[in-house]
Image (cartoon, rainbow, N blue to C red):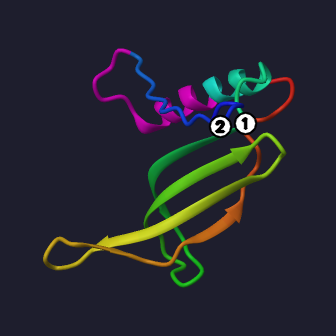
Amino acid sequence: MKLDGEIVNCSPYDGDEHPPSKKLIDILTQDFQLSAAKGEIRAAGICCDVRVATPEHPEKIDAVQFALEHQNGEAVDVFLPYDLDSSGEVRYGELFAARRDKQFFVANK
């Protein structure tokens, strides 16, 4: 999110048609760090598919992760667990959140 509230979609591309997810996340993180250091953004987030343990399931399950940060210092990971039923329909679980270490709005990066 830019300082004026405009939402901007970011899609990194490194020339590889099928790059590893971690590489794309690293590129986005570096881009957000640079934009934050320049004072160009108010908030940033990365959405990705992960496997995570939940309060109800200590074994890891599939979830969508929203890594969200704001210039005021707030940083949170929000998770939306999901699975596919026998007909292939997506079933969503309960959202849950956890604090995260800041990665975008950090000084001297």
Q: Please name whichever residue, 95 or 27, is drawn nearer the observer in this view of the structure.
A: 95
Per the rendered image, the range of residues in magenta is 15-29
For label 1, the crowd category at 10 Å Cα-Cα, with few meaning under 14, some 14 to 19 and many 20 or more, is some
Q: Nearer the viewer, mark 2 or mark 1?
A: 2
Which residue does the image show at 79% across and 51% down from the upper left?
A: 74
**Extreme-front residue of the structure:** 4
In the drawing, what numbered circle is on residue 42?
1
Q: Is residue 96 left or right of residue 34?
A: left
Q: Quadrant of the N terminus?
A: top right
**Which x, y percent locates residue 36?**
74, 27
Residue type, label 1 = Arg
Q: Which mark is residue 5?
A: 2
Q: Which amino acid lies under the numbered mark 2 shown in the image of this protein? A: Gly
The answer to whether residue 49 is left or right of residue 41 is left
Mark 2 touches mark 1? (CB < 8 Å): yes
Q: Nearer the viewer, residue 11 or 3?
A: 3
Q: Is residue 54 above or below residue 66?
A: below
